[in-house]
């Protein structure tokens, strides 16, 4: 077995954490034994779903956690250290330095996109400092970078100065068995639980309540939809975050708060997708979008913002609108809810694209092969020369 130590910020609800949890068993069948090291403990998330040894790195600051992680690497002697998300990337790179253990860092988002500057909570100097640290430590202390989309890989070359030959594009995948199949009985059960009559259109969005996901624009678009006389309901699933207060204010100001449900973190996203008449994905920037590929896998008709990433992922299986444009998003949702044939066509296109590009088993073949390649070749980062 090839032992891989996955270093994560925590086992919360983010895409990297969920993908790690779902990939452990398929990788084990391919001769890869994954253990997980977490910098932080999460109150909600996927830890209960992780069928692997989980190490929590205790300590009051990053330096202590790096030291604990270095001891863990020396004790467990993994063939590869695989990191994801900034703090875990930095800790994994520093801890593995001078241990002769190669480091993989997943590129999962366009974190340094100019669109991030629109976030009023963001301090630009902090983002620039993070970019410099991320790029410098990545170039010197990381052996290879799996990227979940070509758009993310290109952004890393442009914004982090990474060399293209050190990046391999391998998308995230989802298990068809875990998603299950759509059908009228499953749809009816979920809608009954939500208190929805069969004829009431349901718009669903899934994602953390953060600036990136832009649920505020979706609430405003939904309000315009209701104002046109469309008797729809909006369901938002995802844990609270830095945009929660602004989102609640938008709901309260919409005049349609009785028709908007903020579910918070849920464990039944596939069921919600089966119940939905439209899946809205209004992100301002993205890496891949796990909920987007789940929507395609279950045939949910998609309206999404027009980004390089979403075009790459969804191709012809979605309706596209400009980011941060509630008017265009409302128009697209109205068009989709009024056209049953369009919804059926988009759903079928999404199912075909999922089967071709995002089935978990095929993706795990590629990931296991990359682990074997990186483990077998000499490390080439500066600190190990």
Image (cartoon, rainbow, N blue to C red):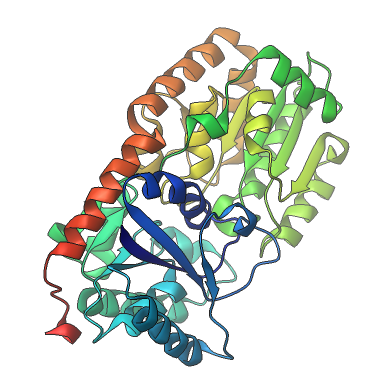
Vertical placement of 110 versus 299: above or below?
below
Identify the residue at the far top of this view: 341
Q: Tell how many labels.
A: 0
Q: Position of residue 46 (x, y in %)?
A: 61, 55
Identify the residue at the far front of this view: 1
* Front-most of residues 65 and 318: 65
Vertical placement of 141 versus 120: above or below?
below
Q: Position of residue 250 (x, y in %)?
A: 76, 50
> For the point 72% across and 59% down, which residue is it?
244
Q: Quadrant of the N terminus?
A: bottom left
Residue 110 in view, yes or no: no
* Front-most of residues 199 and 53: 53
Q: Position of residue 253 (x, y in %)?
A: 82, 48
**Left or right: 355 with respect to 65?**
left
Vertical placement of 61 versus 295: above or below?
below
> For the point 44% across and 64% down, which residue is it?
35
* Front-most of residues 74 and 137: 74
**Left or right: 299 with respect to 362?**
right
Residue 243 in view, yes or no: yes
> For the point 65% across and 22% down, which residue is it?
277
**Left or right: 258 with respect to 51?**
right
* Front-most of residues 308 and 269: 269
Q: Position of residue 375 (x, y in %)?
A: 20, 64
Vertical placement of 348 versus 224: above or below?
above
> For the point 79% across and 15% down, which residue is it?
198
């Amino acid at each position: 077995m090839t032992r891989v130590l996955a270093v994560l910020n925590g086992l919360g609800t983010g895409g990297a954490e969920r993908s790690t949890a779902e990939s452990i068993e398929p990788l084990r069948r391919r001769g890869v034994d994954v253990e997980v090291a977490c910098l932080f403990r999460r109150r909600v998330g996927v830890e209960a779903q992780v069928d692997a040894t989980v190490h929590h790195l205790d300590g009051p600051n990053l330096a202590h956690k790096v030291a604990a992680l270095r001891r863990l690497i020396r004790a467990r002697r993994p063939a590869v250290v695989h990191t994801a998300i900034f703090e875990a990337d930095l800790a994994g790179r520093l801890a593995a330095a001078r241990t002769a253990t190669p480091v993989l860092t997943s590129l999962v988002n366009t974190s340094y996109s100019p669109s991030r500057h629109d976030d009023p909570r963001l301090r630009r100097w902090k983002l620039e400092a993070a970019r410099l640290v991320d790029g410098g430590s990545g170039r010197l202390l990381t052996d290879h970078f799996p990227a979940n989309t070509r758009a993310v890989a290109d952004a890393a070359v442009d914004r982090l100065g990474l060399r293209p030959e050190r990046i391999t594009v391998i998308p995230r995948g989802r298990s068809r068995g875990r998603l299950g199949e759509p059908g009228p009985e499953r749809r009816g059960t979920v809608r009954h639980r939500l208190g929805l009559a069969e004829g009431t259109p349901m718009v669903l969005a899934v994602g953390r309540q953060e600036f990136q996901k832009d649920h505020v624009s979706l609430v405003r678009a939904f309000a315009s939809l209701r104002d046109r006389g469309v008797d729809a309901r909006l369901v938002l699933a995802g844990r609270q975050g830095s945009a929660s207060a602004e989102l609640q204010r938008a709901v309260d100001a919409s005049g349609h708060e009785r028709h908007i449900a903020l579910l918070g973190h849920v464990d039944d996203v596939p069921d919600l997708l089966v119940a939905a008449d439209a899946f809205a994905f209004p992100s301002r920037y993205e890496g891949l979008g796990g909920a987007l590929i789940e929507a395609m896998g279950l045939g949910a008709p998609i309206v999404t913002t027009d980004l390089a990433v979403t075009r790459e992922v969804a191709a012809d299986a979605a309706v596209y609108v400009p980011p941060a444009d509630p008017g265009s998003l409302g128009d697209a949702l109205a068009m989709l809810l009024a056209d049953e044939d369009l919804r059926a066509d988009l759903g079928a296109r999404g199912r075909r694209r999922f089967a071709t590009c995002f089935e978990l088993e095929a993706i795990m073949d590629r990931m296991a092969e990359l682990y074997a390649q990186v483990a077998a070749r000499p490390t080439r980062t500066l600190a190990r020369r």
